């Protein structure tokens, strides 16, 4: 059998590429290398700006040209690094050589030894990962999540008065409204999104074992911890001053657990909407030219929600592995974190793909109010809760002598369907006050929704 030409192994780089392409700017190998170059360049500028070791500050023009190395980072730099790494067998060292090469080309070779000065690879990597993950989350992933929250909020408002039969344990239960049920997901997601937005992104910059030993050996009169903090915070990320050779990754564990939590809520949303579609509560809007089934022409399969469900499970598994692995490092360090972190983009990719499918799916459904109404009309027994609760109130107020209202309603309704007429006869014969009786006789399953519509105002 003839070998295929080179093909993407992951569907994220194949059929799903358009949905996740924005993440590649940050969480790909090239995105990581661009951030590494940024950290190296800015560290060099920070040292020369302070005139350390007799170095002169770099001119504004040369700073701009030096920063262009990461601002205009592209295929030429990607290829240069690949060729150099094939020799060095070390990715961060290849980045250092790229920066030194640019310094030489700018006539700044005299200060080239300040490139990667007193840094261990993890100083550069921890800052680069903090930058890339923060940018991917805040610029790509969170906006997509907020777009879904906005869509859910709009659906909740639109359907706030759409009465529907609730189901607890899968059985007919006290009616609600579709708007309130959708609003529950908007509320849950908004809360977790706020936690994710408040996440820390931390880096260390303290040398080979977190002690600034080489720094002090080179210049004992500099407050290196203060300088390191100022530098890291100038990159708009947080500083971790107490570390081993590596930054401890606890911020990543916290972040990935929160993103996985959001994914669990979204998974619940996907399965609930899928169920509503199967019950006929939502109709799917046909997409011109699309095929639902290869053999059954009538079908419109809920593929957006099924795709989201599967990708959320994959993402959740990966985020769980990231959190479990990154929380531990043997003694000063081991390289399990290095391989693990290369899959951050894969985890976010599957999560973003799920978000994309959910957003599209929510825009391709319409409420079937006639189905909701028919379901309510077939389940008058759900008013049993209202009746026995009113009777309890009447007993307390001294207007009824019924002995056990719950048992009375259980005998009437449990395990059987009753209609409007039968229920009206039952209520009419109850030993309760006329006002309470009138309220109960006016109730229907469609009007027994309490404050469900008002709850939407809390979103």
Image (tube, rainbow, N blue to C red):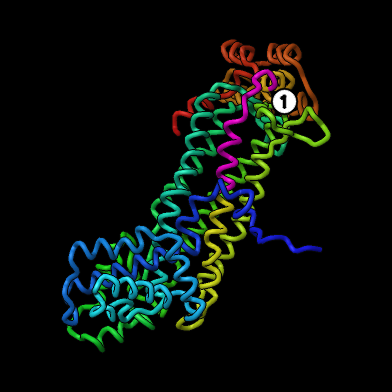
Magenta span: 353-371
Q: Identify which residue, 202 or 454, lies in the foreground.
A: 202
Q: Quadrant of the C terminus?
A: top left
Give the secondary structure at mark 1: helix
Residue that appears at 58% across and 34% down: 362
**Residue 181 is drawn in which quadrant?**
top right
Taking the image as drawn, is residue 403 in sight? Answer: no
Q: Judge whether 407 appears above or below 105 on screen.
A: above
Left-right relation of 57 to 143: left
Q: Identify which residue, 400 or 111, lies in the foreground.
A: 111
The percent position of residue 368, horizontal first and vertical second, equals 66, 22
**Residue 246 is drawn in which quadrant?**
bottom left
**Magenta segment includes 365:** yes
**Magenta segment includes 414:** no
The percent position of residue 348, horizontal first and vertical second, equals 53, 55
Taking the image as drawn, is residue 193 in sight? Answer: yes
Q: Residue furthest right?
A: 295
Residue that appears at 63% across and 26% down: 175
Q: Identify which residue, 97 or 391, lies in the foreground.
A: 97
The percent position of residue 359, horizontal first and vertical second, equals 55, 38
Q: Quadrant of the N terminus?
A: bottom right
Q: How many marks?
A: 1
């Amino acid at each position: 059998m003839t070998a295929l030409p080179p093909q993407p192994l992951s569907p994220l780089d194949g059929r799903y590429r358009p949905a996740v392409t924005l993440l590649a700017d940050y969480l790909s190998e090239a995105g990581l290398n661009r951030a590494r170059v940024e950290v190296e360049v800015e560290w060099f500028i920070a040292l020369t700006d302070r005139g350390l070791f007799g170095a002169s500050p770099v001119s504004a023009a040369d700073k701009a040209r030096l920063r262009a190395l990461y601002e205009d980072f592209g295929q030429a730099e990607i290829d240069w690094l690949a060729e150099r790494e094939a020799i060095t067998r070390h990715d961060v060292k290849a980045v250092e050589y790229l920066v030194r090469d640019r310094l030489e080309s700018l006539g700044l070779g005299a200060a080239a030894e300040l490139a990667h000065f007193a840094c261990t690879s993890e100083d550069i990597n921890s800052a680069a990962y903090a930058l890339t993950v923060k940018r991917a989350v805040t610029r790509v992933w969170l906006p997509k999540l907020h777009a879904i929250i906005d869509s859910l909020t709009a659906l909740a408002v639109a359907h706030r008065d759409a009465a529907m039969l609730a189901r607890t344990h899968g059985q007919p239960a006290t009616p609600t409204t579709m708007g309130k049920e959708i609003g529950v997901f908007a509320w849950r997601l908004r809360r977790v999104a706020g936690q994710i937005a408040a996440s820390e992104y931390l880096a260390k910059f303290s040398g080979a074992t977190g002690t600034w030993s080489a720094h002090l050996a080179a210049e004992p009169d500099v407050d290196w911890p203060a300088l390191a903090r100022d530098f890291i915070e100038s990159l708009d990320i947080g500083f971790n001053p107490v570390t081993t050779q590596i930054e401890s990754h606890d911020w990543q564990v916290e972040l990935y657990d929160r993103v996985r939590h959001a994914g669990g809520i979204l998974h619940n949303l996907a399965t609930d909407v899928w169920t509503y579609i199967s019950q006929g509560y939502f109709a799917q809007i046909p997409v011109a030219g699309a095929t639902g089934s290869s053999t059954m022409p009538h079908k419109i399969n809920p593929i957006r929600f099924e795709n989201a469900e599967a990708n959320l499970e994959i993402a959740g598994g990966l985020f769980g592995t990231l959190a479990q692995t990154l929380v531990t490092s043997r003694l000063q360090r081991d390289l399990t974190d290095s391989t693990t972190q290369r899959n951050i983009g894969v985890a976010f990719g599957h999560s973003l793909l799920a978000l994309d499918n959910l957003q599209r799916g929510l825009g391709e459904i319409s409420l079937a109010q006639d189905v909701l109404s028919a379901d309510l009309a077939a389940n008058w027994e759900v008013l049993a809760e209202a009746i026995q609760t009113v009777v309890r109130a009447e007993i307390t107020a001294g207007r009824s002598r019924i002995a056990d209202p719950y048992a009375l309603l259980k005998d009437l309704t449990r395990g059987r369907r009753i209609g409007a007429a039968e229920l009206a006869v039952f209520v009419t014969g109850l030993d309760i006050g006329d006002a309470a009786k009138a309220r109960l006789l006016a109730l229907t399953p469609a009007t027994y929704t309490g404050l469900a519509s008002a709850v939407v105002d809390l979103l």
